Image (spheres, rainbow, N blue to C red):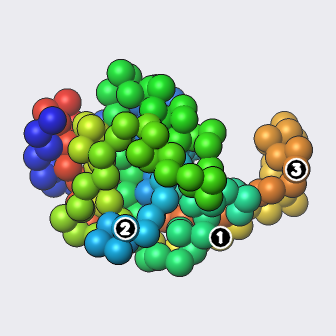
Amino acid sequence: MTLQSIEPNKFIVKAIDLWNNSGMLLTSGDFSKKYFNTMTVGWGSLGVMWGKPFVQVVVRPTRYTYKFTELYDTFTLCAFPKKFLKALMLLGTKSGKEGDKIKESGLTPIESEKVPSPGFAEANLILECKKIYWDDLKPTNFVDETIDGNYPKKDYHRIYFGEILGIFGTEVFQ
């Protein structure tokens, strides 16, 4: 799949569809050191914050990928065509702590252009990001009482804002 560099102001995305239907991987670590992990994500946002194009992602502290998002200042967010849904399901349910789930998924990590964290060859969109902010979700701030139902184990997400340093996508995103 050939990905082209896309300027942020020319990036075309159906944001809600992207999060709900594309299947996305959050990956953090260092490709050159072969030390990274990935997980499927379904909650987040895209936009502008502090005058910078950004993506917001959330990671529970119980996830193995959390260790990598804490240790490294960069991450990638990759979207995939629907035919990779089975691989994304595996990457969202298995832990990288317990074996090489990426190899098992059949997806191919690749070097990114602007950050150490890898992207994936099969992705139709790669956002290369640098962390600019984090915070922890605070249940005392939930205005909608139903939100806490997402946390039966009280393992509230850590929120990361990533400045988008590079956007690489197929013609669908241009």
Q: Mark yes or no: residue 25 visible.
A: no
- Give the residue number, with chain letter if any, for mark 1: 135
Pointers 1 and 2 in contact (C-beta within 8 Å)? no
Q: Nearer the viewer, residue 57 or 78?
A: 78
- Give the residue number, with chain letter if any, for mark 2: 34
The disc at residue 153 is: 3
Q: Quadrant of the C terminus?
A: top left
Which residue is pictured at 45% across the width and 26% down the height? 85
Which residue is pictured at 32% across the width and 27% down the height? 81
Q: Could you tell which of marks 1 and 3 lies nearer the N-terminus?
A: 1
Of circles 1 and 3, which is in front? 3
Q: What SS does tag 2 mark?
A: loop
Q: What SS does tag 3 mark?
A: loop
Q: Mark yes or no: residue 112 visible.
A: yes
Q: Is residue 137 left or right of residue 149?
A: left
Q: Is residue 15 left or right of residue 3?
A: right
Q: In the image, what residue type sits under mark 3?
A: Lys
Q: Quadrant of the N terminus?
A: top left
Of circles 1 and 2, which is in front? 2
Q: In the image, what residue type sits under mark 1?
A: Asp
Q: Nearer the viewer, residue 135 or 141?
A: 135
Q: Is residue 22 above or below residue 126?
A: above
Q: In the image, what residue type sits under mark 2?
A: Lys
Which residue is pictured at 25% across the width and 55% down the height? 110
Cα gap from disc 2 to disc 3, whole angstroms:
32 Å
Which residue is pictured at 79% across the width and 62% down the height? 138
Q: Is residue 93 left or right of residue 19?
A: right
Spot occupied by residue 101 in the image (x, y as percentages of width and height): 51, 46
Q: Quadrant of residue 155?
A: bottom right
